[in-house]
Image: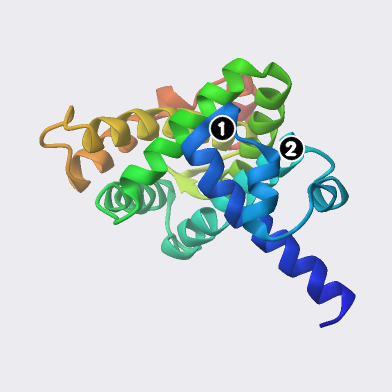
Amino acid sequence: MTRAETKERNRRALLDAALQVVSRDGYRAKLEEIAERAEVTTGAVYSLFGSKNGLVVALIADYLRPHYEQIEQAIPADMDLFGAVDAFARYYRRSCDGPDAVAVLSLQITLLDMALHDPELGAQLAASVRAQENHLIELFTGRSHNGTIVTPPQAQRLTMALRAQFVGLTQGVILGLAPGADEQFFADAAHALASDLALIGPDADAGKHSGSL
């Protein structure tokens, strides 16, 4: 095995081990146990990720990346904004019925707890999530909507609103607090956010002159 292959093997093993230990123990997760499960030394953690927090941040990026890649695949480039939002909403609702839905919710709650106990880690996690959400912002930017084109700031506000909405709805579905919240309900809720009023922001006046919303 080459040095590069060994490095990738150790990186992957640490991410997989961190997912197991962090999901169970949260901010109490021990770096020594993560390293032991990955069959490496704690020095490998510092070499590859810089710190325990660096490993957790990398874990979230690794965890979110395929999620956003699947979203991109589910939304064709030629859809208008409502079509794209509809496809996104339905994808999100189907994830509630996935075999790992409860584990995902548990991890989300664990990470929130970790962020509250460690503000520095919280800031790093927020930056990591925003970096992944940039893919979604790019996905909505430039789509047609009521004869106009969605601008990057509008796509950013919409993405933020959709994330907040779907995180809450997903938790409600999994916990049994959102009876009747099927795919159509998710889609209707997303359509409401994608209305003109939801998208209008600081650049609204400029949009009147530039052809944007």
In this view, the residue in front, 21 or 124, is 21
Q: Which residue position is annotated with label 1? A: 154
Side of 72 where 177 appears, left or right: left
Say what amino acid the circle numbered 1 marks. Gln
Q: Which residue position is annotated with label 2? A: 52
- Residue 90 in percent (x, y) is at 29, 51
In this view, the residue in front, 25 or 116, is 25
Question: What is the quadrant of residue 13 in the picture?
Answer: bottom right
Side of 160 where 31 appears, left or right: right
Q: Secondary structure at mark 1?
A: helix
- Residue 29 in percent (x, y) is at 60, 34
Residue shown at 39%/33% (left/top)?
Answer: 167
Residue shown at 67%/55% (left/top)?
Answer: 14
Residue shown at 69%/61% (left/top)?
Answer: 39
Considering every residue shown, the one lying at the far left of the view is 180
**Way the structure is coloured:** rainbow
